[in-house]
Amino acid sequence: MAIARQFTHSLAMNRRTFFLSAGAGGLASGIAVRADETSVESVPHDGPALGGAPVITGPAPEHMVILQPLRRPATGFVEFAVGDAEFQRVDADVGGLHPYESHVLKFRLPPLPTGKAVRYRVTLRSIDWVRVKQWVHGKIVAGDPEPGVERTFRTLDPGAATSSFVVWNDTHENSETLKALHESTSALNPDFLLWNGDQTNDVHFESEMAGQYLAPEGLPITDRWPLAYVRGNHDLRGPAARKLPSFTGTPDDRFYYSFRSGPLAALVMDTGEDKPDDSPYFAGLAAFKRMRQRQADWLKATITQPWFREAPFRILFCHIPLWWVRDRTDIDWWEFSKVCRDAWAPTLQEAGVELVISGHTHSHTWMPASPEQPLAQLIGGGPQPHQATLIHGIATSDRLSLKMQKLDGTLLQEIVLPAPA
């Protein structure tokens, strides 16, 4: 009780000091400042706000997103132009406020025409808050505009005669592997890059996520072609994992979606974690069983769409394999191959999906279709340079050609799948 009385008395004295000061010549705004409360706090300008090249993601033309990593708090906008047309401006304002973020700005583009070159540029302004302690409202200090360089990407074309794509997986923040993969991908100039999960070891701090997901090692990962992002189990680990939609641009911010690129119809599905929901590891925070069921329902609806049914080739991309050569019921985490397989494989067979491309095992493997495994499956390697792989696929109307190679270009597997009769 004594403590409560002391607190009440202190509060009353503070209020009395405030009102007396306000009535005795305070600020014109009507907010008073005592002489010892006028110190100013601000974040100094320490260089540009641009934190690396933009990331183009989506990846379908009706779901394109530009993500701009930041070095410091900033606002900004995107300008884009299809072909030689005039630039159009896109702001990411919500509820009457332009964006003000510390780590990434996210811009959703309007639906774009298919198979077209799109020029774009990002303009930023750093934003600081100058705060006078106690009674004075903050002041916003904006830096000078920082125009980014003009870049170009091409939207995917469902009607194209061919589709070229590259698959990375399980990079786990390994700098040597990332640099080698980026160099090889730039030489191949694919229509899209698919990053098949486990970009990170964990997602612990939001302040690190731009470097993990958008500009690892400062590389311009997908400023020239769209990124198809697949969530891996390590991308689910850590308190900042719930911030992942801010650093990805999947349709409707879901981690399962579909798109068409030339002869290829792609399904992206989220295999979640490699442990049961009730595992003590999650402390009651996991709900992947319901997520698998939602995807099962979504899959049944998606495969009925004409754009999907009419595609010569249909591929599922997912992080955890649906089958594995060391699939053993006495090891809990391999059970997760089975639970996803049981939930989705019958529908995938019905849809005519011929191939699953996965990661997770850190051991590259080709598993042809068999009576026990009706879908062929290609699994990429691991994060260390001696394990890592790059998968390059080219789909035409009559064949799907796949090459899996090491970082030094050594061919590990070459596969050719003919179009279904």
Image (cartoon, rainbow, N blue to C red):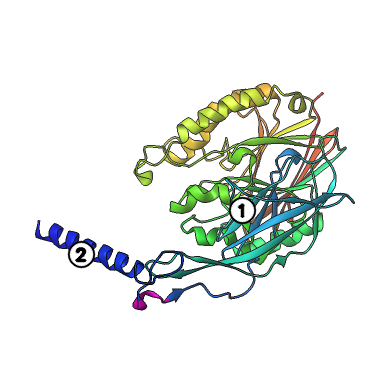
In the picture, the disc for residue 10 is 2
Asked if residue 248 lies left or right of residue 243, the reply is: right
Q: Position of residue 59 (x, y in %)?
A: 71, 43
Q: Position of residue 38 (x, y in %)?
A: 40, 75
Q: Check residue 38 for magenta coloring.
A: yes
The residue sitting at the left extreme is: 2
For the residue marked with disc 1, what is the amino acid? His
The magenta stretch spans which residues?
Answer: 35-39
Q: Nearer the viewer, residue 352 or 147?
A: 147
- Residue that mark 1 sits on: 98
Which badge, 1 or 2, comes first in the chain's sequence? 2
Q: Quadrant of residue 280?
A: top left
Q: Check residue 350 for magenta coloring.
A: no
The residue sitting at the right extreme is: 84
Q: Position of residue 337 (x, y in %)?
A: 52, 36
Which type of secondary structure does the marked residue at label 1 adopt?
loop
Q: Nearer the viewer, residue 309 or 76?
A: 76
